[in-house]
Image (cartoon, grey):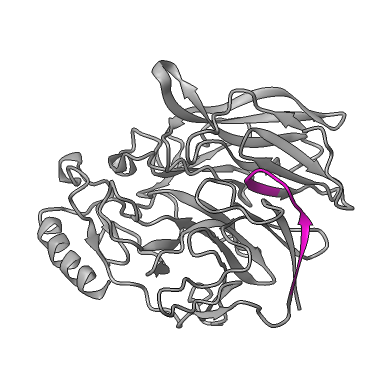
Amino acid sequence: MGAFTRAGKLIAFLVAITLVPSALVAQQDLPKDGDDRPFLGELPRFPLEKYSLHPEGVTVETYLQDLDVVWALEFAPDGRLFLNEKGGKIRIVSPDGEMDPTPWATISDVTAEIREHGLFGLALHPQFPEEPWVYVMYSYVSGQDRTANRVVRFREVDGRGVDRQTILDDIPGAATHNGGRLNFGPDGMLYIAAGDARDRRRAQNLDNLGGSILRLTPEGEVPADNPWPGNPIWAYGFRNIMGMAFRPGDGTFFGADHGPTVEWEPRIGAYDELNIVQKGANYGWPVVVGAPAMEGFVDPILSWIPSVPPGDLVFHQGDLFLSALWSEALVRIQFDDPDDPNRVTNVERWFNSQVWRDGVLPESLFGRLRALAVGPDGALYLSTTNRDGRHDPRLGDDKVLRIVIE
């Protein structure tokens, strides 16, 4: 990896010296095809990661099992758990852990057969249940067999989702890189993660929703204080945002993005990122990855080699937790510097051994991990996603795990 990275940096530098970083990079300055590499910045400095297959003081139990790729978890104020299954079902689990056999709602036009298609993020209205709206994002087939994504909301009436309304339509979609996470911020606005949908040039184009974090009112309007009038884009320059979280207390906005790791793009093999998301900021993809310290781009606070890549983000007991897909771990990120609340002071990967010997892969307890939520009981809830076509399912998959941290 080291020699490959050094050679890649030299190639990237020769490409990048012709680029002029700015708040919005000119289209002609973008990489022309998949053979061009973005400029490879340095990795932000952070403590050496610690691996623990069985982290001390942590107990795990299976809360639910035999599910179909749980993409999102959200607890309602009354203790019920809402969850999304990839195939299009929104389900309800009672406070005592019993799942209603009848879906709360089923989305009939969702496409779930192709790789990363399906039912994605879920968010409850900030005033739920007084405002009884549940929001979801999903992939569908648009005109001329074109994949797209949309955000809709359902009103809860008598324990079921009805009165479906479209909030935002025709978000770029593809077999991969759909983004999909939904979160309401402390400002009461809906934040939507939109991937670049396999066309990385979208991420630097403010006239295209792909490769961005979008911000709307709960009714689907563009807020007056968005960075560009009439434009849903809040921040841009992302590849495939999968996790968003707001830190309790100060509301700092964190976003986790997938780095370039696939065969039809520059195969760098890493540079997944954790960013602090700022209004109107450009996070660099596909012009740069990592932390290049270039004017016009915001650097991540963490960037990983090897790949993580992220599935979701949530704050719990003052720490930021990131679920990992390919590396099959739950990552705990700590910020214990009283002088700098955004400086990472400790990084741990749980439920993974990271023992590479004689070609033997590391052992992981649960496989691919995705959805995260904090329950009313103070426990952390985490879903596996081993039935998503990229892993061999294990007994009982897919599951929701309940994690108690002493």
Give the residue displayed 40% in from the left and 74% down from the top.
359
Residue 211 image position (x, y, % from top left): 39, 43
Q: Residue 97: x and y, percent? A: 85, 52
Q: Total of numbered circles in the picture? A: 0
Identify which residue is drawn at 46% across, 36% down.
232
Q: Is residue 387 magenta?
A: no
The percent position of residue 205, horizontal first and vertical second, equals 30, 39
Quarter of the rendering occupied by the N terminus: bottom left
Can residue 69 be found in the magenta stretch?
yes
Q: Is residue 20 above or below residue 232?
A: below
Q: Is 106 on the left or on the right of 113, as rendered?
A: right
Q: Is residue 246 visible?
A: yes
Left or right for 268, reference 332? left
Is residue 277 at all visible to an observer of this figure?
Answer: no
> Which is more toward the observer, 289 or 301?
289
283 vs 142: above or below: below
Question: What residue range appears in magenta?
Answer: 59-73
Prevalent SS, magenta region: strand
- Residue 122, given in percent of the width and then of the height, sits at 64, 42
Up/down of 166 relative to 180, above or below:
above
- Quadrant in the rendering for residue 289: bottom left
Front residue of this view, candidates 217 and 198:
198
Q: Tell which of 33 and 68 is nearer to you.
A: 68
